[in-house]
């Protein structure tokens, strides 16, 4: 059995569905970056739990843990990481060797500081790496990227290479101004003009809409042709902290809590939303762009 088919069958078995016809993809995978201007706004927790929400809708989900060295998915979900993308780049491991299985069958690629090694690759090594990613392209329906915060080139690359972006913002004024600064850089320097806005750590829908309006009014006024799509809010919920301390996803541990219900709703909305503006949503194309930046 070839490697790609083996991986696909593993993912499908865990999704509780029969092995598909080899090579038959369900469509172009959606590549979605979860990002923010300011750190500590909940990106990693949202990416991890949203991945599980998508999984419960029958989607096969891969997350790239692209934050460099901060409290990451492996910590919040209590996973043991032995290898990361560095080992794929160096040719020591294949992509399926470094994939880690998370709760409810989500798959995670630990990236860590390995991404910096991309700058050292020769043309031939870049092609080898691309063919590794080509192998997983039809094994997943959704590829989520948990980015670090800010406007460094690293974050910028992930955001412009992804087909869709979820910008996580909280009601803190600094979080709103930093989200604006991120969108401004992505739009003015790279022409990236579609964003999904998720308001986290809020008291409820009124505050969340206020935050969204604040941000989208500033973008409308000073930047112009940018689509800002509100995808919902997640309330401040003490169960997040409890779940992190138990190293389990809140959506698994406390499915009935307000934050878990919000995440499930947001997941449904994203899946149902048309991605007609996403013409470049496949995983290989994403990597081609990323590798091209280095
Ligand atoms: N809705 C929420 N309610 C309460 N705490 C939250 C919420 N969202 C995230 N947190 C907490 O905020 C902290 C930062 O979250 P994290 O996902 O690591 O953010 P980031 O990845 O953006 O740096 C964590 O301790 C997490 O448990
Ligand atoms: Mg994080």
Image (tube, rainbow, N blue to C red):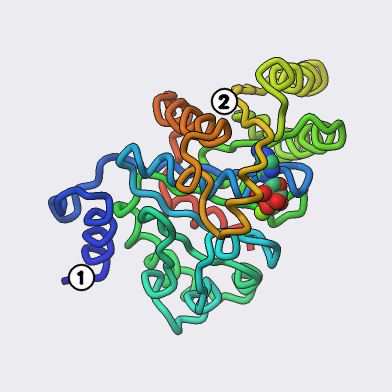
Residue at (86%, 31%) from the top-left corner?
173
Q: Quadrant of residue 74?
A: bottom right
Residue at (42%, 56%) from the top-left corner?
103
Q: Is residue 61 left or right of residue 189?
A: left
- How far across and down, in percent of the image, does residue 271 sit? 41, 31
- How far across and down, in percent of the image, does residue 232 sit? 59, 25
Residue at (67%, 30%) from the top-left corner?
199
Can you say whether 83 is above or below 78 in the image?
Answer: below
Q: Which mark is residue 164?
A: none
Residue at (64%, 23%) from the top-left corner?
228
For residue 156, say whether it is visible. no
Secondary element at image label 2? strand
Q: Which residue is disc 1 drawn over?
A: 2
Can you say whether 10 is above or below 160 in the image?
Answer: below
For residue 71, say whether it is visible. yes
Give whichever of discs 2 and 1 has the lower sequence position.
Answer: 1
- How far across and down, in percent of the image, does residue 210 sit? 75, 17
Q: Which mark is residue 231?
A: 2
**In the image, is the residue at mark 1 within 8 Å of ligand 2 by its beta carbon?**
no
Q: Pick the residue in front: 169 or 163.
A: 169
- How far across and down, in percent of the image, does residue 275 sit? 44, 28
Secondary element at image label 1? loop
């Amino acid at each position: 059995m070839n490697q790609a088919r083996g991986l696909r069958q593993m993912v499908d078995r865990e999704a509780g569905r029969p092995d598909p016809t080899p090579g038959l993809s369900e469509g172009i995978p959606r590549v979605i970056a979860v990002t923010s201007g300011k750190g500590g706004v909940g990106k990693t927790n949202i990416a991890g739990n949203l991945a599980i929400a998508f999984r419960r809708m029958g989607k096969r989900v891969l997350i790239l843990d692209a934050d460099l060295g901060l409290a990451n998915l492996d910590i919040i979900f209590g996973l043991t990481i032995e290898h990361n993308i560095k080992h794929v780049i160096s040719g020591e491991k294949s992509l399926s060797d470094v994939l880690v299985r998370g709760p409810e069958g989500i798959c995670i690629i630990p990236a860590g500081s390995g991404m910096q090694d991309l700058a050292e690759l020769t043309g031939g090594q870049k092609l080898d790496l691309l063919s590794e990613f080509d192998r997983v392209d039809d094994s997943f329906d959704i590829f989520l990227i948990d980015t670090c915060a800010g406007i460094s080139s690293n974050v910028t690359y992930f955001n412009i290479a992804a087909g869709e972006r979820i910008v996580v913002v909280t009601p803190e004024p600094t979080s709103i101004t930093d989200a604006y600064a991120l969108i401004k850089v992505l739009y003015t320097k790279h022409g990236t003009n579609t964003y999904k806005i998720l308001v986290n750590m809020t008291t409820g829908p009124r505050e969340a809409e206020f935050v969204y309006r604040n941000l989208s009014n500033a973008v409308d006024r000073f930047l112009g042709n940018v689509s800002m799509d509100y995808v919902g809010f997640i309330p401040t919920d003490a169960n997040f902290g409890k779940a992190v301390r138990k190293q389990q996803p809140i959506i698994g541990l406390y499915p009935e809590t307000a934050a878990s219900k919000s995440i499930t709703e947001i997941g449904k909305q994203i899946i149902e939303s048309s991605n007609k503006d996403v013409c470049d949503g496949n995983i290989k194309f994403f990597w081609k762009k990323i590798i091209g930046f280095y």
